[in-house]
Every structure is written in structure tokens, then in C-alpha cells.
Image (cartoon, coloured by chain):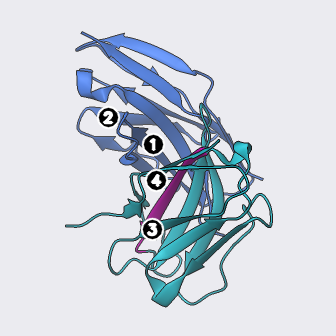
Amino acid sequence: GAGVSQSPSNKVTEKGKDVELRCDPISGHTALYWYRQSLGQGLEFLIYFQGNSAPDKSGLPSDRFSAERTGGSVSTLTIQRTQQEDSAVYLCASSPKTGRSTDTQYFGPGTRLTVL
Amino acid sequence: AQTVTQSQPEMSVQEAETVTLSCTYDTSENNYYLFWYKQPPSRQMILVIRQEAYKQQNATENRFSVNFQKAAKSFSLKISDSQLGDTAMYFCAFMNLNTGNQFYFGTGTSLTVIP
């Protein structure tokens, strides 16, 4: 079956430009996560969506970062006025997540963002 | 706050041999899950194995097994009969079931299987 997909796979932009990264979760998964992986680093949590609840934005590094999830499915991560330190791989994951039980996160292939 | 520590940035192992990757974590919680994820050069994160903290029995998945020491807050991954396709970054992750919103990841261990 289809997994989590992300687009674009690679994005090169100039400093100061805005970028949008897209994530299509697995159909039926209610939870969606965004992570950032900088070179040589682990995964840094950015934001979490669960159903119709207010998103957990506690990981967003600055107000230049925002994310939306429309219709409980597709999500878009937007970075405004990009800076060179924003260069990283941005990973999206989804999870079926029912009630208090945890479910495994399924990751997309990521978008490699390079800010020149 | 939860932290996950992987103290081995790089490791290598001969093909067909066994290797153990270490992971320790720090939490005051009692109800949580632990995971090992694999990230090959393709960047796709793949779940290797997971362990529920309430289970005493160590999780096993084919050639992959864990040594879960709850009191010591240690969660090592053993890969038996290493294969070339095991070459990847391996991330240890923690999830607090009481909040359930965030996974906390270690910085990863780069494993190279040598033919």
C-alpha cells in the first residue's frame, strides 16, 4: 500500500525566500508529525497534528515556521524568509494513533532543503 | 524532560558478525515505549523494533533484538548475522505514553557493515 509521501524531494532556495513542503500521510492515519534533521544530527520535533485537536507547535524554532493540515489529511510546512541555518532534511511521519495507545510512526522519504 | 543518548557516533562490523548499538534514556515516567529506527542512505526511516516499557521480555524481530534494562534506563540493539543492507544510521527513540505527542530521538549511530 501507499506510504507517506513528501514533495518536493529536494528544494534549493535563496536566502529570504519562502518555501512550502508538502506531506501526504497514509490514508486513515489521524496523527501527523514534522521533524527536522540537520546534517549529522538526530531528529528534532517540530509540530504534531492529531485529528481535529489544536496542533502541538512546541517544537517550531521560530515564528518563521508554520504548518497546516487541511481536512485532516495533507499537511504543508511553510518556512518564511528562509535562512541558511534552515538547511536540513524535513521529515514527515504519520501514525494511526487511537486513544491512549501508541502506534508506530511511518516516515516519508523527506525533503532536503538547501538555502543558499 | 526526556533525553535519549547514543554514545557511539560510528560503528562497523564484519558481515555475518554480531554488533550491539547502545542507547540510554532519562525519564521520570513509568509508562513509555522505546524504538529503534533505521535510516539507510535513501533517507527513508524504517522501524526496526519497539519495546513497551511494561513488558519485561525483550523484543525480538528476526536478526534484531534488544536488551531492555528498565532500572538502568538502557535500551541496546543487537544485530546478529550482520548483512550489507544493515548499513545505515540507527536512531533510538522514546515516546512517553502519558503525553503521546512527541518522540524523542537520539543523535544516531552510523553503522557500516564491512564485506
Q: Chain of mark 2?
A: B
Label 2 Cα crowd, 10 Å radius (few <14 / some 14-19 / many 20+): some
Q: Could you say which is closer to the camera, residue A21 or residue A56?
A: A21
Q: In the rendered view, tell whether residue B58 sits above or below residue B103.
A: above
Tag 3 near tag 2, CB within 8 Å: no
Q: Are marks 1 and 4 on the same chain?
A: yes
* Mark found first going from the N terminus, 1 or 2: 1
Of tags 1 and 3, the one toward the viewer is: 3
Tag 3 near tag 4, CB within 8 Å: no
At numbered mark 4, what does the secondary structure look like: helix, strand or loop?
A: loop
Label 4 Cα crowd, 10 Å radius (few <14 / some 14-19 / many 20+): few
Q: Quadrant of the C terminus of chain B?
A: top left
Q: Chain of mark 3?
A: A
Q: Which chain is cyan?
A: A
The residue segment tinted magenta is: A88-96
Of tags 3 and 4, the one toward the viewer is: 3
- Say the numbered circle drawn on residue A23: 3
Which residue is labeled 4 in the image? B55
Q: Chain of mark 4?
A: B
Which residue is labeled 2 in the image? B64
Query: What is the spatial separation of the Cα atoms under label 3 and label 4, in whole angstroms?
Result: 34 Å
Tell me which amino acid carries mark 1.
Answer: Trp
Query: What is the spatial separation of the Cα atoms under label 3 and label 2, in whole angstroms?
Result: 30 Å
Tag 1 near tag 2, CB within 8 Å: yes
* Mark found first going from the N terminus, 2 or 4: 4
Query: What is the spatial separation of the Cα atoms under label 1 and label 2, in whole angstroms?
Result: 10 Å
Tell me which amino acid carries mark 4.
Answer: Lys
- Say the numbered circle drawn on residue B36: 1
**Is residue B96 toward the left or the right of residue A15 in the image?**
left
